[in-house]
């Protein structure tokens, strides 16, 4: 008991300071929620004080349904964080996303960077740079520079259907479970990688998640959602990854044996192959990107975003 009491006496200044800080944060949030320009926009009560409501919603796995309910309850424009709004108004959405819009991208977009130091078309916040990047990528995304797009899709779709027939067929006297949703994702990955790189990953043929890519994307999406809300983490990672020791442990590497790093390695080798070969007419998305002047680092990042 004496030791416990002595330990409490030793840490009580820290606990006192922590309580004061929490109280100050609460009152700061309360005052800001009342004086902020968004104060008159309705929304869930605690969402106006703290970002924890939004974080909890995103982590629930039901955020899409919950956001729909928020708009039904509070109107087409609702407040879901101290500085976050959500709208169900299609006209307002078009105005925000229109070419030449005066709306600026928020710091949360930095969470969409694969490498904290390399912006991509999804994360670029500078309007002029973003428009220039979109122009460079437009022909590739529109399939205008991709050779025999429909033929590629037809062949892969036919191969996919044959593999489904082979993998899912039950033997007499047995019933075999078959996850069609998972196989559709395999088809999607193989289609995109074939159109992007000129060669499919082989998810359909091997009936598996090659390189653990889909799992890595699923985990990464959940993490980036939280980084979107607590955008200060993205800024912290930007500075941490300037340190070589930290960079090796934070940023996916082409030398990784699985996950996103492994996929980046595949893309990296495809990019190197294009640079080492003689210049040829654009036949895939990668070729289109390089033809329009993207650097190796940009091409790596944009192809990962495409996937």
Image: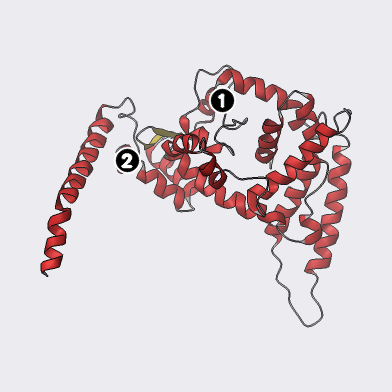
Q: Secondary structure at mark 1?
A: helix
Q: Of the numbered discs in the image, which one, if any, rests on residue 50?
A: 2
Which residue position is annotated with label 1? 97
Q: Is residue 207 left or right of residue 281?
A: left
Q: On the picture, is 77 further left or further right than 181?
A: left
Whether pointer 2 and pointer 1 mark residues with C-beta atoms closer than 8 Å, the reply is no
Give the residue drawn at x 83%, y 44%.
153
Q: Which mark is residue 73?
A: none
Query: What quarter of the picture does the N terminus occupy?
Result: bottom left
Residue at the image point whose x is 40% and y is 43% from the top: 54
In terms of depth relative to the viewer, which is nearer, 41 or 59?
Answer: 59
Toward which corner of the image does residue 285 lie, by quadrant? top right
Residue drawn at x 49%, y 53% is 61
Q: Nearer the viewer, residue 147 or 67?
A: 147
Mark 2 or 1: in front is: 2
Q: Mark 2 vs mark 1: which is more N-terminal? A: 2
Give the Cα separation between the discs numbered 2 and 1: 27 Å
Helix, strand or loop at disc 2? loop
Residue 99 shows up from this direction = no
Q: Position of residue 12 (x, y in %)?
A: 15, 53
Residue 114, by quadrant, is top right
Judge by depth and name the residue closer to the eye, 261 or 67.
261
- Residues packed near mark 1 inside 10 Å, few (<14), some (14 to 19) or many (20 plus): few
């Amino acid at each position: 008991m004496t030791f416990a009491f002595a330990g409490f006496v030793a840490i009580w200044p820290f606990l006192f300071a922590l309580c004061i800080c929490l109280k100050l944060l609460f009152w700061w949030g309360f005052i800001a929620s009342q004086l902020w320009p968004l104060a008159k926009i309705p929304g869930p009560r605690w969402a106006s004080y703290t970002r924890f409501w939004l974080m909890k919603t995103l982590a629930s796995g039901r955020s899409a349904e919950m956001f729909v309910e928020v708009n039904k309850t509070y109107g087409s424009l609702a407040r879901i964080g101290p500085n976050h709004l959500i709208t169900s108004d299609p006209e307002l959405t078009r105005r925000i996303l229109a070419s030449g819009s005066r709306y600026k991208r928020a710091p949360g977009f930095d969470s969409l960077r694969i490498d904290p130091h390399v912006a991509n078309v999804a994360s670029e916040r500078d309007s002029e740079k973003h428009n220039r990047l979109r122009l460079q990528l437009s022909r590739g995304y529109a399939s205008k520079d991709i050779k025999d797009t429909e033929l590629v899709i037809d062949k892969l779709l036919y191969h996919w259907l044959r593999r489904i027939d082979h993998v899912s067929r039950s033997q007499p006297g047995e019933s075999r479970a078959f996850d069609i949703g998972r196989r559709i994702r395999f088809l999607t990955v193989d289609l995109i990688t074939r159109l992007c790189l000129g060669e499919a990953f082989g998810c359909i043929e091997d009936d598996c998640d090659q390189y653990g890519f889909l799992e890595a994307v699923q985990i990464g999406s959940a993490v980036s959602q939280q980084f979107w809300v607590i955008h200060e983490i993205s800024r912290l990672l930007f500075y941490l990854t300037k340190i070589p020791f930290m960079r090796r442990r934070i940023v996916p590497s082409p030398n990784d044996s699985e996950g996103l790093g492994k996929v980046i390695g595949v893309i990296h080798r495809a990019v190197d192959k294009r640079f080492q070969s003689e210049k040829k007419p654009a036949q895939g998305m990668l070729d289109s990107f390089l033809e329009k002047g993207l650097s190796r680092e940009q091409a790596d990042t944009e192809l990962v975003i495409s996937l």
